[in-house]
Image (cartoon, rainbow, N blue to C red):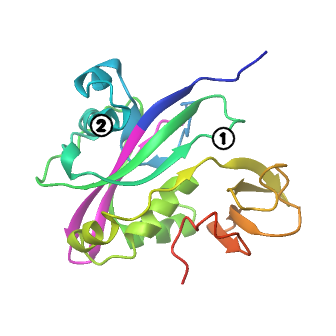
Amino acid sequence: MNQGPEIRPASTVILLRDSNEGIETLLLKRNKALVFAGGFWVFPGGSLDPEDLAHAGGDQEAASRIAAAREAHEECGQQPLPEDMILLSHWTTPEAEPRRFATWIYAAPLRNDEEVKIDGGEIHDHRWLTVSTALEEHRHGNLAMLPPTWMTLITVGRYTNVAEFIEGERESPVPYVLPVLCSHEDKMVALYQGDAGYDAADPSQQGARHRAQWRDDGWDYAYEGVSDEFPPLLEQV
C-alpha cells in the first residue's frame, strides 16, 4: 500500500527587530525552481538534520530550535538564539503535496545587526520589511506567501514592538494544524479542523467555516460557526 511521502520534521523562525515604523521582519524569496514553495516569500528554515537531533539528545522540539538557528545562519547570515525562540504554531504539509513537512514555527528577536547574506541558490532575494508593509504588499500581489506565513505575520502585526510581542505570545496556546487543500469557485482553499468540509475535503458543504481562501487581494481567513473544540488560528476581533 502506498503510504505517501515521508513527513520530515522541520522548523522556521520569523526574525524580529524594532524600527520607528513598527516591528520589522526578514523575508526570503525561494528559488522558483524549487518543488516546495518555489517563488514564495518565507521565513528562514528547513529540515532537521541528524546533527541537530544528536545535539539535542534526540529531543525533536529542542532540535527544531537548533535547526531554525542553523538555517537562519546558512540562508541569510543571521544568528537568532534557540533560547530566545517563542513557539507560535506547528503546521503539517497537506496530504496532497509531493513533499511533506511537520514544521515548528518560531519567532525570535535579533540581538545583533548582522549583514544579510543569501546564497543565490535556494534563496534568490531578501527584504527587511515592517510587518504591516509585508501584509500590504501581499494584498497588492507583490509578496506571494503561503497561509502559515501570512497568519504568522498577522499575529506579530498585533503588537507595536518586539518586547510586547514576546510578553503577549510567550504563554499563548500552540495550535497544531493539518490543512486540507482544495479548490472552490476556481480559488485555492485551505480547510482547517472544524470546517464543515474538512473531513470530506469538500469546501462546498454547508455549515461551519474554518478556512483560508485565496482572493484577488491575497488570503482571507474565515472562522464562523466553529465548535469551541477547534479554536481560531487568528485572534477574532
In the image, residue 24 lies in the stretch drawn in magenta: yes
Does residue 113 lie above or below 226 as drawn? Answer: above
In terms of secondary structure, where does tag 2 sit?
Answer: helix
Q: Position of residue 106 (x, y in %)?
A: 35, 51
- Of badges 1 and 2, the one in the foreground is 2
Question: Which residue extends farthest left?
Answer: 112
| Left or right: where 122 falls relative to 100 | left
Q: Residue at x 25, y 74 (%)?
A: 164
Does residue 224 lie above or below 214 as drawn? Answer: below
Q: Position of residue 184 (x, y in %)?
A: 83, 58
Instruction: Let me know if residue 172 appears in the view.
Output: yes
Q: Which residues are magenta?
A: 11-32
Q: Which of the two residues, 145 or 203, is positioned nearer the viewer here?
A: 203
Instruction: Let me know if residue 144 appears in the view.
Output: no
Q: Residue at x 21, y 70 (%)?
A: 163
Q: Which of the two residues, 136 or 70, is positioned nearer the viewer here?
A: 70
In terms of secondary structure, where does tag 1 sit?
Answer: loop
Amino acid at dot 2: Ala
Amino acid at dot 1: Pro
Q: Earlier in the sequence, mark 1 or mark 2?
A: 2
Question: Which residue extends farthest right?
Answer: 205
Mark 1 crowdedness (10 Å alpha carbons): few <14, some 14-19, many ≥20: some
User: Which quadrant: the N terminus?
Assistant: top right
User: Which quadrant: the C terminus?
Assistant: bottom right
Q: Quadrant of residue 56?
A: top left
Our reading of the magenta stretch's main secondary structure is strand
In the image, residue 137 lies in the stretch drawn in magenta: no
| Left or right: where 233 falls relative to 159 | right
Please name the residue that numbered disc 1 is placed on.
Answer: 94
